[in-house]
Image (spheres, rainbow, N blue to C red):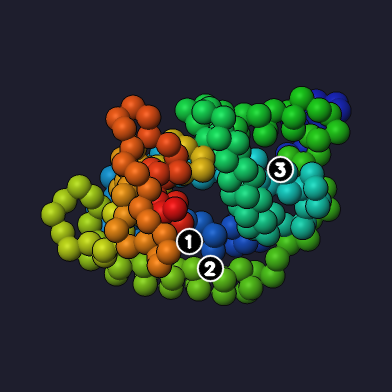
Amino acid sequence: MTVTAVGAPARRPVSDRTILRAAPWALVAVALVAALAGTGTPAAAIARYGAYWLLAVLLPGTLLHRALRGSTGNLPEDLGYGAVTGLLVELVAWAVAAATGLAPLLWLWPVLAVAPFLAVPRLRRCWRIAAPRPLPVAWSWGVAAVCVGAIAWATGEWAHVPLPPVTANYYPDLLYHLGLVHELTRSMPFRVPQVAGSCCATTTCPTGTSPRPACSPGSIPPSCCSGCGWARSCW
């Protein structure tokens, strides 16, 4: 004898169609993780970045996009728009945090972004898709195939560029870009990391200008030390 609780909503079984729609995107995720692991990326680093991407970019971005524009009716498109929205809002949060000296607290921004969607009843609708409009399965598999192809191409590049710190012939700008990324976590507007905190006395000033006078220790003005461009270093 089977007893059914009165008023309890019946659970809808996951249909084969739903699994078929999710399969191409799961394949892309598996291919990306396999490519990263196969080219020497530590598992812990993959897990940390995956958690960051899901919790600090994708989740708040998707909720914000749904609140502002509404759902597209399917999860893949919502997540695509949400990723762009999340990155945009995160850049704003970073600029504010870096400019105010609160960069160490930047990891809290997803909490501030998601909290209203938990606390405000009207915003809780953004957690679900009210009117589903699934994407064509063939289209999903086609896009997934393109993504896997891009991952396969990138894997060949990653295999020839080992992660620092190791002895290797890096592309000249790679370490410079990494230096910029680190500097961006500390100040806004940021300084050129190779000369941050040191005085720049240029000898290549345009005609009619001269180098700025040397800076005395402990009193280095930003106009002299933010970079070695002649616009800042010459009179």
Comparing 5 with 65, the one in front is 65
| Circle 3 SS class | helix
| Circle 1 SS class | helix
Q: Are marks 1 and 2 in contact (CB under 8 Å)?
A: yes
Residue 177 in picture, x, y percent from top left: 36, 55
Q: Quadrant of residue 119?
A: top right
Residue 223 in the image: above or below residue 156: above
Whichever of labels 1 and 2 marks the residue nearer the N terminus, that label is: 1
Q: Which residue is mark 3?
A: 63
Report the disc number at residue 28: 1
Kind of residue indicated by mark 1: Val
Name the residue rendered at 30%, 30% in the picture: 217
Residue 72 visible in the snapshot: yes
The answer to whether 58 appears left or right of 41 in the picture is right
Residue 185 visible in the snapshot: no
Residue furthest left as drawn: 167
Q: Which residue is mark 2?
A: 144
Whichever of labels 3 and 2 marks the residue nearer the N terminus, that label is: 3
